[in-house]
Image (cartoon, rainbow, N blue to C red):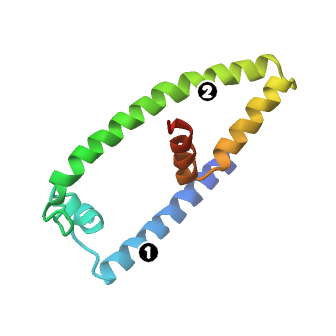
Amino acid sequence: MVLLLLKRIGFMIFTMIVVSIILFLLLKTGLTGDPTTRVLGNFATDNLGTSTRYKGPVKDVLLPKLWNTAILGFWIFAIMIPLSLILGILSGMKEGSMLDQTISVFGILKTSLLLCQKGQLIKNLLKP
C-alpha cells in the first residue's frame, strides 16, 4: 500500500514537472492567446475564406458537398454493418470451411485495395 502511494506521488510530481516545462516553453515562444483560434484559424470563427475556383465563399461551396458526403456515409454504414455481421456469423459458424476461407480472402482483398481502385472497380462493374 505504501509502495503504491509512493508511486502515485512520484507520478504526480513527474506530471507537474512536465506540464511546467511545456507551459514555460509555450510562454517563452510567444504562443499565448486562444489555442482554438491559433490551431484552427478562421475555421473556428466560421470564416472559411473565399474560393478561388468558384469565386465565392467556401462555406457556400462546402456545405452542399458535405451533405452529400453525409448521405453517402449513412448508406455505406446501413449496407456494410448488416453485411459484415451476416458474413462474420456465417464465417464463424463454419470455421475452416471453404465459405470461411472465401469470406476471408475477399475481406483481405477488399482491405488491400486503395479507395480509388475500389471506385474504378465498382464503376466498371456497374457500367452497362
Q: Residue 89 placed where, x, y %?
A: 70, 19
Q: Residues within 10 Å of mark 2 (few under 14, many from 20)?
A: few
Direction right: furthest residue: 96
The image shows residue 37 at horizontal and vertical percentages of 22, 64
- Looking at the rendered structure, the secondary structure element under dot 2 is helix
Q: Looking at numbered disc 1 in the image, what kind of residue is underneath it? A: Ile
The residue drawn where x is 70% and y is 44% is 109
Callout in the foreground (1, 2): 2
Label 1, residues with CA under 10 Å away: few <14, some 14-19, many ≥20: few
Residue at 35%, 42% (x, y): give it. Answer: 69
Q: Which mark is residue 21?
A: 1
* On screen, residue 64 above or below 52: above
Indicate the position of residue 29 as horizontal and vertical percent values. Answer: 32, 83
Q: Secondary structure at mark 1?
A: helix
Q: Give the position of the N terminus as an image quadrant.
A: top right
Nearer-the-camera pick, 57 or 126: 126
Give how far apart the Cα atoms at labels 1 and 2 are. Answer: 48 Å
In the displayed structure image, the side of residue 33 where residue 57 appears, left or right: left
58 horizontally vs 120: left or right: left
Displayed quadrant of residue 7: bottom right
- Residue at 69 percent across and 50 percent down: it is 3
Q: In the image shown, does 116 or 79 lie closer to the viewer?
A: 116
**Residue 41 placed where, x, y %?**
23, 66
**Looking at this view, is 124 or 17 the one in front?**
124
Residue 84: which disc?
2
Q: Residue flagged by tag 2: what amino acid is it?
A: Ser
From what the image shows, is residue 49 above or below residue 120? Answer: below
N-term-proximal mark, 1 vs 2: 1
CB under 8 Å between discs 1 and 2? no
Please state if 22 lies on the left or on the right of 52 as rendered: right
Q: How many marks?
A: 2
